[in-house]
Image (cartoon, rainbow, N blue to C red):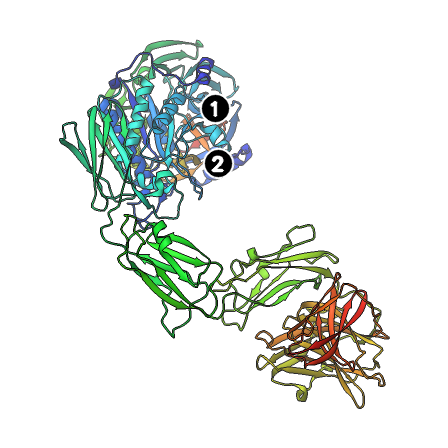
Amino acid sequence: MKKIFSVLCAGVVAMSAVAANPSDLKVYINPGHGGYDSDDRVMTIHPFADGDTATFAESKSNLGKGFRFRELLWEKGYKVEMSRVKNTTDDDLNLSTIVALSNKSGADLFLSIHSNATGVVNRRNFPLILFRGYDGEAQIPGSLEWATYINQHLLSNQATVWTSTSLNVRGDWSFQPSWGQQGYGVLRGQTVTSVLSEGSFHDYIPETYRLLNSDFHWIEGWNFRKAANQYFGIEGVEYGAIAGRINDERVLRSGDFKMFDDDLYAPVHNVKVELYDANGAKIEECITDDLYNGIYAFRKVNPGNYKLKFVSDTHYGTECNVTVVADKITYTNVKMKKVRNTPPEVVSYSPQWSEGGEPVLCNAPIRLQFNWDMDAETTEAAFSITPAVEGTITWEDQNYCMVFTPNPTYNISTEYTVKLAATAQHAGGTPMTAPLEFKFFTTDRNFMKITGQFPNEGDKVHYKAANVEVRFDKIPNIQPILEQVKVYDSAGNAVQLNKRSMKYSKADAEYGYFRIPFSKDLVVGETYTLDLSKEIADKDGLQLQEGVVVKFQAVDAGEAKTNTIIDNMEDASLYTLYEQGCNSLESASAANNTANKLFDSKCVAFTYAFEGEEAGEAHWTRAAAANELTSADALGIHIFGDLTANQVYAEFTTDSDVKYIPLCSMTFLGWRYLEVSLASLDSSKTYKFTGLKVAQTASNMSRTGTFYVDDISLIVGGSGIPTVELADLKVYPNPASEYLIASADGIIDFVQLTALNGTTVAVAQGNILNVSEVAEGTYLANIYTAAGRTVRKVVVKH
Amino acid sequence: MKRKSLLLMTALTLCASMSAAELSVISTQKVNVADAYHPTLSPNGDVVLFSTDDYKGLKVVNIESSEVQVLDPEVGAGFDPVFSADGKTVVYRSVVRENGLMRRDVKRFSLEMGAGEQIAAPSREMVNTRAIVGDTYAYGLADQQAIEVSVDGMVQTINPIEHGYRYLWTSVSPSKDKILFNEIYSGLYVSNLDGTKAVNLASRADYPCWAGDKYVIAVKTTDDGYVFTSAKIIAIEIETGKVTELTGDDVLVSGVSANANKIVYTTDNGEMYIMNILIAE
């Protein structure tokens, strides 16, 4: 045994010094699997349907290869036994039965014929030959040599496309280590020199089609015989053969599967291949099938010089000379040029639009469908669109369809003219007989717009049960959202969002949105980055014009305060809807809520629905709280915003006066603690807290909402927030008409706009204040930061 | 392959015996040998011939003492050895490869003398070793396409199944009035000696052997086309066709042999067990 091993390590050498007589030799053939059973491996490929046994089944393919191998062995005089000659369930013998048959047969060689499968998308094509034992250490004498010869000859097949031509001879114990020394059942217990051949990959789809072809089976059988002859030292046959594959020279093979090299090009069907001898006499002909493989073969040709002619109804004929030598397949792969016998023309196009018709989406691709496969270079050069638009051109349907996709979009409300000059040619080089021209008009919208978002830049977000919510002018395409919304901590680590709890717009919603909670509570004090991809798009595919990146900080909005509690919000019944103070209100309520409470056991949920998109007001009053407040004080309030951008006011009352002081614009989601100066109260009077009011900000997302309020408190002398001067503070534009923006190095808590008499007219969390509804005039902008309040005089002018 | 405890298997087989009224498993014991496959039990049930998984070498083990004796270390020597009727002699073949050709010699080993001899030089013939050790046997002929049946020297060649393709695992019953065989595509049969009245016992069953005249023991295997997925010992009552599993899913049986109220079987990982059985008459 040691001697045998040393020979194997030194390399595979011919087994036989003295050639045997084939009639003395016996080969046992086992076509693997059988009977379209559960252990068969079936590939349902076009044009076959599920359950159609005409599609690829490994049992059938293995049997076909086994038959061809047997015929070739018989021709040389070998004795042959096969474990099955049919393909039914009864023929699918137990592996142990096959081994017993082989051992009883008196055979010298055993071959189990299979094909391989990766079962994954990333498919390749190469042979794998297995013997019993560890790599390089065959348990059954001779099987390493037998396997190596098979592998070498299979690799000589040039009618296929190999992705690797390295020898791939493996011991089954090494190849399947999890099986231990059990190994492949058909090799186990063999006394005969045995191998299992996975000849090629039947789930590499071009190979799947080839394995449907009998000539391709014959090529594999030929190579098996070559290996057997080599193993025994038997002389080859006196004749040769010609085989090959026919593909189109430029039409690509269609199909969403892996392809390599010539497999990228479409096989040509029904090609008549004619074989002529040196005297010009036709000897033989064959025809390729219509199963997407292009395989042909002349299986028995005397050595000599020949001419091959390839004739097709769909392709221009071609021919080539070949030389046939004994005992060898001369591979002749050819590429044929498709016949295109009429000029090209556009048979259909889109977008279709007529004057006064529905405008076309600003991202609609332009599709030109031709009657022929087109030459990409001349066709793309002939294409133009006016006004000019950046875009990309792609080709579909094997160059029968050209697609122009604007990048990013067309202009809104614009008429475009598309032209295709007559210089566009099909792949055969013939130009069009006439140009094409058409027009279309675009809609008034070419980007998805964010209408509300939380968190915004610089927001302080309550750490517990926080959410990311973004609202849009159209319903977003939700499926890819989780890939398009990312949150990172300050170290750059991704923060997980709870996709299972994500909420988003229903199909009939008034506006588009999504809300995604964080998987875990945020870390108080940590700074986070929210990254909204530009790829976020609506159902029509219109994307954001730009991506959004904002930083926000996690805080504890429920941090303990030492203020004097005015209302702990444990009793919602104190708040009554004041109908005379309401406007355009459909419904409203005030109710205790335990799920979202911040302190004690409850908070109060204020729920409202306005009738329209503007001018709505809901007003709740309560019996005057006991605490007395003056303009020297401040109000502390915990409020859970609903991201409607609606304004919330607190009501303060004296016997003769009622004041409404803006608390916030609800451009946030979740709890927030506010301290609001009461400096705008009449300094000569003493007030009491008597209610809350929400006023609608005109938009399609402000119609309904719920905000929660917990502990309202009094900060005696709290209005005396120190006035500071921030050297780097900028407040702009001035005059302002839509928005007033404050910027400084530090985080700006909120901006409050007061009249010169001290009355607050607008307030907003963060650094941006909407002044579009503020009357023209001169005001004081109060910018609140951690350092205190900074005042700038500003003008509102519309 | 899962390893299993002897206790578990014993419990299972005893349980199985309760459902097969006439065949009872009295006990199961492990034989202290390793790397044991392809068992052949002697006629009186005292020793077992065995080999490696790939039939390299032929050994014999005494069931009581676990003493192992190597009869032949050669490649292929463990394939299909046969005992003489008195159990004292073993005849077998070993394999010789010359220029890629398989040749098999025939050897005889006397267990009493502890010595062996080559009785036929290597040849391309698959010599019928059963005919060497006795005059009662059933043997597959000519690529297993017919069965040669000999009882006390009366020889006949039969093809008991119409369109039968290949016959495997053929044997004559202890009372010499039936034969047992496997036709590879249609299953396991018992028939008269002349092949008449063939009764199908199972669609698939490997390594069938007699356990008395009323029972057949075999291994029911399944595979996925590449590897064995299960292999259990079954007992088939010939008269009723009733099948009883004698081993469970926890063991993958690699070979079985029966004689003298004993069943010997080997497992996927090379362990050997003896079942002592009782067949009520």
Check the picture and name the quadrant holding the C terminus of chain A: bottom right
Camera-side residue of A266 and A3 = A266
Say if B186 sits above or below A690 in the image: above
Locate residue B61 relative to residue A631 in the image: left or right: left
- In what element is the residue under mark 2? helix
- In what element is the residue under mark 1? loop
Image quarter of residue B176: top left
* Mark 1–mark 2 distance (CA, rounded to whole Å): 21 Å
The amino acid sitting under disc 1 is Ala
Locate residue A509 relative to residue A720 in the image: left or right: left
Chain letter for mark 1, please.
B
Camera-side residue of A566 and A618 = A618
Check the picture and name the quadrant holding the N terminus of chain A: top left
Task: Answer yes or no: is residue A784 visible.
Answer: yes
Image quarter of residue A754: bottom right
Task: Answer yes or no: is residue B212 visible.
Answer: no
Say if A193 sits above or below A56 in the image: above
Picture coordinates of residue A313, whole percent (x, y): 20, 46
Residue annotated with mark 2: B13
Look at discs 1 and 2 and give the one toward the viewer. 1
Residue annotated with mark 1: B36
The residue shown at (67%, 72%) is A666
Mark 1 closeness class: few <14, some 14–19, many ≥20 residues within 10 Å = many
Among the two numbered marks 1 and 2 on one chain, the one whose residue lies closer to the N terminus: 2
Chain letter for mark 2, please.
B
Image quarter of residue A587: bottom right
Picture coordinates of residue A182, whole percent (x, y): 46, 30
